[in-house]
Amino acid sequence: MNHSHHVLVTEDNPDILHHIKKLIVDAGFSVTPFETGERAVEFASDASFDVVVADVNLPGMDGIESVTSIRRSKYTPVVFISADPADRSRVARVGDGAFLEKPFSPFDLITAIKSVLGFLPSAEFG
């Protein structure tokens, strides 16, 4: 894979955000990271990216709200992440996408991204 696919990541924990960014870059994708949903939505309004990895429980505008806002202007595949297994049902109301429960393995994260991009068959994650 050659950095032709761009991943927008939102995660409010800087250590987790750094770790996720490294995993995604190591898998051959380019990444734009944000610690807030508001900043991600602002960036998304005039940027090109292929998939969103969004923490569900962000302060302020949460991951579900930010993805819903982004999708108002363009459809984007999404991988939701959360430490709360109950968020799986909240995410299901948003529609398609993948859900990973924290902590997740590097393999599961990259597999989920590739799956929502259509590189792999759909699977259950987390």
Image (cartoon, grey):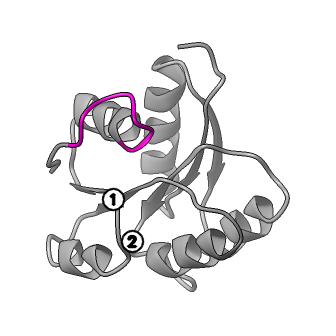
Which residue is under mark 2? 56
The kind of secondary structure the magenta stretch mainly shows is loop
Front in this rendered view, residue 118 or 67: 118
Which residue is under mark 1? 81
Above or below, 65 against 14 in this view is below
Label 1: how many residues lie within 10 Å, few (<14), some (14-19) or many (20+)? many
Q: Which residue appears at 24% of the width and 34% of the height?
A: 121
Residue 81 sits in which quadrant? bottom left
Q: Which residue lies furthest to the bottom in this view?
A: 60
x, y percent for residue 18: 52, 40
Front in this rendered view, residue 73 or 112: 73
Above or below, 109 against 37 in this view is above
Label 2: how many residues lie within 10 Å, few (<14), some (14-19) or many (20+)? many
Mark 2 lies on a secondary structure that is: loop
Q: Left or right: 13 with respect to 39?
A: left
x, y percent for residue 70: 64, 70
Amino acid type of the residue that numbered disc 1 sits on in the rendered structure: Ile
Above or below, 126 against 18 in this view is below
Q: Which residue appears at 62% of the width and 78% of the height?
A: 69
Q: Which residue appears at 45% of the width and 20% of the height?
A: 27
Q: What stretch is highlighted in magenta?
A: 116-122
- Does the magenta-highlighted stretch encompass residue 121? yes
- Nearest to N terminus: mark 1 or mark 2: 2
Q: Which residue lies furthest to the top in this view?
A: 2
Amino acid type of the residue that numbered disc 2 sits on in the rendered structure: Val
Q: Which residue lies furthest to the right in this view?
A: 46
Residue 42 sits in which quadrant? bottom right
- Does the magenta-highlighted stretch encompass residue 115? no
Q: Which residue appears at 38% of the width and 44% of the height?
A: 116
Q: Do the residues labelled 1 and 2 touch (CB within 8 Å)?
A: yes
Mark 1 lies on a secondary structure that is: strand
Q: Left or right: 78 with respect to 120?
A: right
